[in-house]
Image (tube, grey):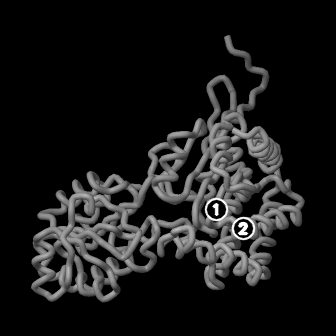
Amino acid sequence: MPEDLKKLVTDIAVRARAASLALAVSPAAARNAALTDLAARIERSRDALLAANQRDLASAEANGLTASQVDRLTLTGERLGHLAESVRQVAALPDPLGEVLEETTRPNGLRLRKVRVPIGVIGVIFEARPNVTVDCAVLCLKSGNAAILRGGSEIFETNKALAALVCESLASAGLPHDAVQLVPTTDRAALDVLLRLDTLVHCIIPRGGEGLIRFVAENSTIPVIKHYAGVCFVYLDRSADPAMAESIVVNAKTQRPGVCNAAEQLLVHRGAAAALLPRVGAALAARGVALRCDPAAASLLAAAGVATEPANAEDFRAEFLDLVIAVRIVDSLEEAVAVINRDGSAHSDAIVTADRAAAEKFMAGVDSAAVFWNASTRFNDGFEFGFGAEIGISTDRLHARGPMGLRELCSYKWMVTGTGQVRA
């Protein structure tokens, strides 16, 4: 390990820790002013940001990126507008800091308050997602946390341009410029250093492919909040409305196929398969989706003139991140729940049904971070949930689950007020 690289990353963490202590007691007005300023800078800097993004895109093919990775990497004027709006939404959200979660007075007169506070320093490790740079910076800033951002080499130019805007906005509001720092190297050894700075960094959030997330989880001495994959299911129950089933499945699979909340698996109740599957399958095929089917589903689709591919065992547990979906027929709602809990990733799963009792049974039985009734899995997203943005989606059971917004970026501490009490 080169000593200069170790010193570089350690110095970043030391400065971030100092900045986090200042942010924790900063006025909400200052944090909101920085965010409002950032939204305006993103809009004013549209051409420069797109130019930086084009430099990254120019290297994408040479770096062997897939079509879905290129899509995640690409900035457009529309996406920049959405990004600026998400920053404004975060600025408009209530300040999470200082909220009293619980309050009680003990028999001896001690007054106990459980108060929401920042986590401290949060390291975010991510790949080809330019929105992550801004989303994570603004959520950490609003919640009083310092952020250390380490993006992939495929997005380095875009990240530098966005991070520079964040630093300018921090300065404009009189906040520590070290509150958001981008690791200025793509050397993998820098990540190895960061993941072991557990006396300075309090939480690591990886965003990217399963390989990156597993590497971070297996090599970090810092707590990691994560999800490994998005093997998301849509289950069409016996009483599903055909038009609704088609609309939800097509949206969940094709609206953005390369993201973690896109549907990868389709289950259809045997009692409704003849009525539902040909229509849904034809709609998917018309949008270029490859259907990898079990024999029963393949037979129904073939009779309707819809082309299919035979599925293997791996397909039924796969996160394709592409215009591919695995299809199988199940005999009951109970079987659908069992299949999802066995083969899914506890991320986002949906049921389409007109039967309230069936929906409630599904939603109670599926052990996932988010379950949907008559809605697309694509809504498992911080922006769509009203968080303004998200720093990631967690499938962990401890601390945070689902989209992580401001409250999920906070911890708490006990504030105890006495009148001179001593313990006997």
- Tag of residue 153: 1
Query: Please, what is the three-letter code of the amino acid marked with disc 1?
Result: Ser
Q: Secondary structure at mark 1?
A: helix
Q: Secondary structure at mark 2?
A: helix
Where residue 314 sits, quadrant-wise, is: bottom left
Where residue 340 sits, quadrant-wise, is: bottom left
Residue wearing tag 2: 91
Image location (x, y in percent) of residue 419 = 78, 25
Is residue 237 visible in the rendered image? The answer is no
Taking 287 as reference, is 81 left or right?
Answer: right
Query: Please, what is the three-letter code of the amino acid marked with disc 2?
Result: Ala
Q: Is residue 285 above or below residue 214?
A: below
Q: Is residue 253 above or below residue 260?
A: below
Report crowding for label 2: few under 14, some 14 to 19, many 20 or more residues within 10 A (C-alpha).
Answer: many
Quadrant for the N terminus in the image: top right
Q: Residue at x 45, y 45 (%)?
A: 397
Image location (x, y in percent) of residue 135 = 65, 65
Taking 411 as reference, is 276 left or right?
Answer: left
Distance from Cα at disc 1 to Cα at disc 2:
30 Å
Is residue 42 visible in the rendered image? The answer is yes
